[in-house]
Every structure is written in C-alpha cells, then in structure tokens.
Amino acid sequence: MKILFVASELNPIAKIGGLADVIGALPKTLKKLGIDVRIAIPKYGIVDEEKYQLEKIAEGIKINFYNKDEKFDLYQCLLPASEVPVYFIDHQKYLGDNGIYFEKSAMPEDSLREAKRFTFFARSVLEIFEPLNWWPNVIHCHDWHVGILPFLLKSLSLKDKRYKKIAALFTVHNLEYQGHYEAKDISEMLDLPIPEKNIDQNKKINFLKSGLVNSDFINTVSPNYAKEILTKEYGAGLEDVLQKRKNELRGILNGIDTEIFNPENDPKIKYNYSIKNLEIKEKNKLYLQEICGLKQDSKIPLFGLVGRLAEQKGIDLISEIMDEATNLNCQMVFLGTGESKYENALRGAEKKYPEKIKVFIKFDAKLAQEIYAGCDIFLMPSRFEPCGLGQMISMRYGTIPLVRATGGLKDSVKNFQFSIFNIQSTGFVFEKYDHRELLKTIKKALLIFKNKKIWRKMQINGMSQNFSWQKSAKEYIKVYEKLKVLNNYSTLSS
C-alpha cells in the first residue's frame, strides 16, 4: 500500500495550525503499521534546509503553467523521529517567498498570490512520480489548499493511464476554510476549462468544493462533525454537495502524538509526572501562577485556554462572562493570537482584573505545554470544532476540559453528571452556544473541584484515555484498502 500525503504544512518543519500536527503524526503511525507513506509539501522560504538535512533528488522537472514551461526541483528529507520520506517542491517564484501564507489570514480569499502558490504546488505534485519511480495507490489530500488536486488527477488520467490507478482521498479539517478564486485565473494557470461543478454560488472556483466533488472518497476529522456538516448550520454553504456524497463521507477522529504530549517526559514542562504521582502536577500549577504573576495558591481553581482567538473558539462567550467569572474566586490564563477585537477584549479584562487574569498574545510552544500541565480546567467553548486537539492534550496532562458539545469535542469528552453511574466522566460539556450556559458549566466545574476524590478520579479517567493515532490510523488503512480495490476494479473495467 503506497500513500502520498499532500498538505500545506507539516510539524515541525512548517507549521501554523493543527493541520501541521496531523500531517506530522499520522504518517508516523501508518509507517509503523507497514504502510509505504510519504509526504509532499512546498519548499517555503521558512524551511530550514540544514536543520532538516534536505537533499536535492531531482531537478528541472517540467510543468505547464500559464501556458509555458516552468521547471521545479525536488528535495527530500526524513520526517524527524521517523522513517517517513518528505518531498519538497522547490520553485522560488511561486513557493519560495515568505511562510505558508502571503496574507495574515489562514483563509486568504481572493488572494491571487495564494491561488498561484497552491495551484502550482498541486499541479507539480503530480509530476514527481516518474522521477521517483514511485506511484502511489492513494493521494491523500488535506484541506482547501490542495482541493484542486483531485480535479487535476482526473484530467491527467484522460491522457496518461498511469494516473487512472491512483485514487484521491480528500480530508476536510475545517469546512469554513474554502479558498474562493476567480475561475478564469485558475483556468489560465492550468490551461484547462474549469467544470461547473467546481464553481460555487458566487461564480468563483471553490477549492474545497472541488476537492469534495472530484475525490473518490471524503472524510473529516471526527464522526460527529461528519454528521454536522450535512446540515445548514454547519455546512458552510456546502451542505447540499455533502448530502449528495454522504455515502462516500466518513468521520475519523484525530489523535495526538502521545510521545510528544506526555507529562512523564515532556521537556517543556517544569516538573514531570504521571498517573502514579499525579500530586506533582500541583507544582506545575504553582510554577504557572508564578510566571503569570498570579497569586500562588493550589486551592484557587486555574482555567487555561490555548488557541486562536476567534469566534469559532467561543472567545465571544468568554468575553461576555468575564466580570461574573472573576467573582467566582478563580484565575484564568490565555495564550494565542487572532482577531483584534478578541485580543483587545482579553487585554481589557487583564487590565481590569490583573490579579486574576493573565493574557499572552503570542504563539509559544513551551508556554502552551506549561498551561496544559499547570491548569486545573481547560476551556474550549467552541461554536464549532471539527475535531480539536486541545481537549485531548489537556486530558493527557490531567487537566479537565470544559467544552461545548460540538464536533470532535462531543466525540472525545465524557460529560460529568450528578449521578452514581458517572464513573467514566472526563470533563464538563454544555450543549447550547450561549454565555449563560458556559457560566453555568463553569460554576458546576468549580463545585466539583472542591471534591478532591471525584476530581482525582476525573483526572485519572482523562489520562487513561487512548488518544494515540493507532486507532485512527487503522481506520484510514481500511479506507485506503477500499479505494485501492475500487480503483483497480474501475481501471480494469475501463
């Protein structure tokens, strides 16, 4: 079984968000399970050639772009701590400048530079197989950046039968991020007419929609999100497209890299601990309080949030309850960047309640780990959440997640209820997206926090969960095998 992952980012080589974590972890597990899995990403200017020991393995590979020959080089390295090959498409003009995005947003709509970058990348990937003498059974495409690739694969298969044997799996990590561009611009780049089914209601090509309609199979990153996106509330304008393909749609819950996220040997936290000596976690709390300038007191409940400061993450709900929450004898620490209005709202709350709130407007991987290890409760009151990794990481560190029942949060957190049968609970879950419901759930969590016996049981439940990629990887292998069989059959039939 030969699988090529194609994505815009990869942890630790080029990372902005959670997509990079998935691409950096899932292939490692697939490799251990015997899959010949490889990864292709652009060779951005931020890629450290020396650190990751990149080696040029092919040069002068031609593609037609804007109706003229463009040449790119191909580099390779191994994904750190693995035997997974990573291929880098090297073309300075379209891929080399800047980081992953030219624009500040991770959803740079109507940016012609972004359109050129990711269209060139997707088209180039399909030309590396002959130089490598390696043809995949499945190209596993991730998110809108490479949504055009299944369409290009179909186009090439009409001219070259070798491409007919390759199936396309398209994984949606976040349906809200779609990539809308002028169809005529993309058509000029590729020297191809763009079929109507790739066009959205705004008469633009929609990269994500293109991936949905042209791939052989679709999956998203949690079972519950796969159901949600069939509805108007969560479908982001593509619910009708997804309804038509619901028989080829599946939800597979993401995992986390349990070797990296392990409180027993995590080098980023002050004091290592495990279920066997969970009392040491309290030292991390006191240390976090110290570096945040908050009162050091293990009896004061400490809430944490790590992530993008955006409406999707429920920051608007948190902003609305800040005054009431700070009256509940608790502390809060926030880490992240995002929309200015939410950054300013949190800064304002910190200024108003400096003894109870600390805000870090930045990305800091070490501090993130210290928050996971040092907090009592981890906040994820998301409006929607395709999967979410924060709740899994927090449970791994014995920090209780408080989440809204949406997407992967609903799939992965078992709600505490006042019941004698509640021995498996791992967190606190509320249903309605409403600030009053969030505040009510915070009060519930604070009440249970006082009962150290129940709290310790919830911590142990969370730390005992298996969020490794093993289970998810086996589910993906089933999909790959199905696609390989179906594609071989259709090739023979044609």
Image (cartoon, grey):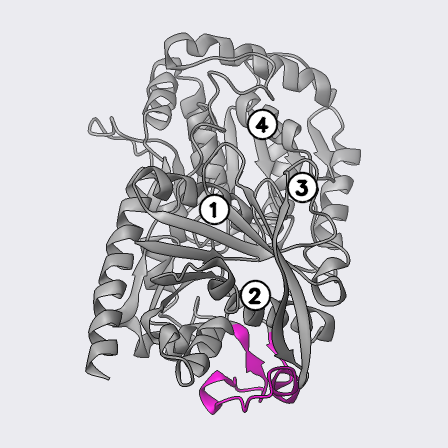
Depth check, mark 4 against mark 3: the one in front is 4
Q: What residue range appears in magenta?
A: 180-207
Q: Which residue is mark 2?
A: 145
Amino acid type at circle 3 is: Gly
Identify whether 412 is placed above or below 448: below
- Label 3 crowd (10 A; few <14 / some 14-19 / many >=20): some
Amino acid type at circle 2 is: His
Depth check, mark 2 against mark 3: the one in front is 2
Check residue 336 in the rendering and tell me which mark sits there, or answer none.
3
Nearest to the observer: residue 320 or residue 409: 409
Identify the element where label 1 is drawn.
Answer: helix
Identify whether 71 is placed above or below 151: above
Is 55 colored magenta in this rendering? no
Report which quarter residue 8 is drawn in.
bottom right
C-alpha span from label 3 to label 1: 19 Å
Q: Do we see residue 447 in this rendering?
A: yes
Q: Which residue is mark 4?
A: 369
Identify the element where label 4 is drawn.
Answer: helix
Nearest to the observer: residue 380 or residue 422: 380
Amino acid type at circle 1 is: Val
- Label 2 crowd (10 A; few <14 / some 14-19 / many >=20): many
Q: Earlier in the sequence, mark 3 or mark 1?
A: 1
Taking the spot 66% from the left edge, 86% from the top edge, the residue there is 67
Q: Earlier in the sequence, mark 2 or mark 3?
A: 2
Q: Earlier in the sequence, mark 4 or mark 3?
A: 3
Amino acid type at circle 4 is: Gln
C-alpha span from label 4 to label 2: 29 Å
Taking the spot 59% from the left edge, 48% from the top edge, the residue there is 17
Identify the element where label 3 is drawn.
Answer: loop
The x and y percentages for residue 45 are: 74, 52
The x and y percentages for residue 371 are: 59, 27
Q: Earlier in the sequence, mark 4 or mark 1?
A: 1
